[in-house]
Amino acid sequence: MSDITICIVEDYEDEALSLSHQMALVGYKTVIAGSGEEALRLCREGNIHLVLLDVGLPDMDGYEVCRRLKADPATVDIPVIFVTARGDAVDVELGHALGAVDYVPKPYNLPMIVVHVDAALRTRQSQLDLVSGPFMLVDPAYTDQLTGLRNRRFLMERLQEESEKSQRYHYPVSCLILEVEDGVQEEPEEDLSDELLVEIAMTLRKNSRAFDIIARYDETLFAAVLPHARMDDAVAYGKKIKQELIQMASRSSCVLKDPRISMGITACLNGERPGSAEEFLGSSMNKLLLAKSNAPEHIVAGEYSGG
């Protein structure tokens, strides 16, 4: 497996560095090109898996860069995403006609760029053996299309597998489920914005281990399967995630006035495990309901007893 390298083609240094930092948060490597010719050279040299391309460049416009990339057999297969202030229908149509896979208008939401990048790279999965940061690119059937995390189907299959392995090899495994709500919403049933859900997903990604299984379970519910984590480890992980989410909400452009983050955690030790993934997750879900009832720090954790 090879690491993914993204070429950011942008002549404004601040914007280029901001994009590069965002890509690094989720494990992508980046190189920055400040001109069209530099971008073409980097792509011809190889090991570029995707191009984030601005239209306004000092030597040639981004459309010409894309045209040349798609005309060269050495670079024709590199996905191109336009990231530009030129976002009207004619520009979008032209970008796609030249072979771009996506078009993101400025001003953009940085976390959403990651979603577009992940989606573009998934289209190449059958041709390339790639890793998106610490996360293997998988069939879209196992992926939540909004956040790029694993979905409920993947979660349940891997939770079953991991709990069976923990019993066989006698190592601990924990299952955490969390819910993020706005404590002062005027309408209690009001959904969180897509942008905020993406930022929550990114916070989970960057604060989890490579072999943890992170998934969006349903709407505002997220889950984590933590192999080799005892209850104390899982609680420490949960508290870290909670603090990171609170900090994220405080600096996010997506308004979350009073983030209320509740968690239910079940830890399996000494080879004990529930009979099924549904039972394992259900145990954590029951603890989540208790956590939402004004439990200390809105976290309830316990070991599975086998009873």
Image (spheres, rainbow, N blue to C red):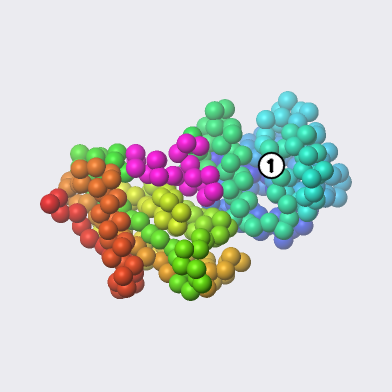
Looking at the rendered structure, the secondary structure element under dot 1 is strand
Residue 244 seen? no
Count residues near mark 1 (Cα–Cα under 10 Å), then give few for <14, some for 14-19, many for 20+: some
87 in relation to 199, above or below: above
The residues colored magenta run 140-158
Q: What residue type is disc 1 on?
A: Asp
Rendered location of residue 147, percent (x, y):
52, 50
Answer with left or right where residue 131 lies relative to residue 231: right
Rendered location of residue 46, percent (x, y):
67, 34
Q: Quadrant of residue 42?
A: top right
For label 1, the residue is 102
70 in relation to 18, above or below: above
Q: Residue furthest top?
A: 73
286 in relation to 67, above or below: below
Q: Nearer the viewer, residue 164 or 184?
A: 184
- Image point (39%, 40%), residue name: 153
Rendered location of residue 233, percent (x, y):
30, 59
- Image point (14%, 50%), residue name: 306
Q: Residue furthest left?
A: 307
Q: How many marks?
A: 1
Rendered location of residue 284, percent (x, y):
29, 56
Residue 297 seen? yes
- Image point (22%, 60%), residue name: 302
Q: Quadrant of residue 251?
A: bottom right
Q: Nearer the viewer, residue 41 or 53?
A: 53
- Image point (71%, 31%), residue name: 75
Answer with left or right where residue 100 lies relative to residue 119: right
Answer with left or right where residue 281 lies relative to residue 9: left
Residue 185 lies in the magenta stretch:
no
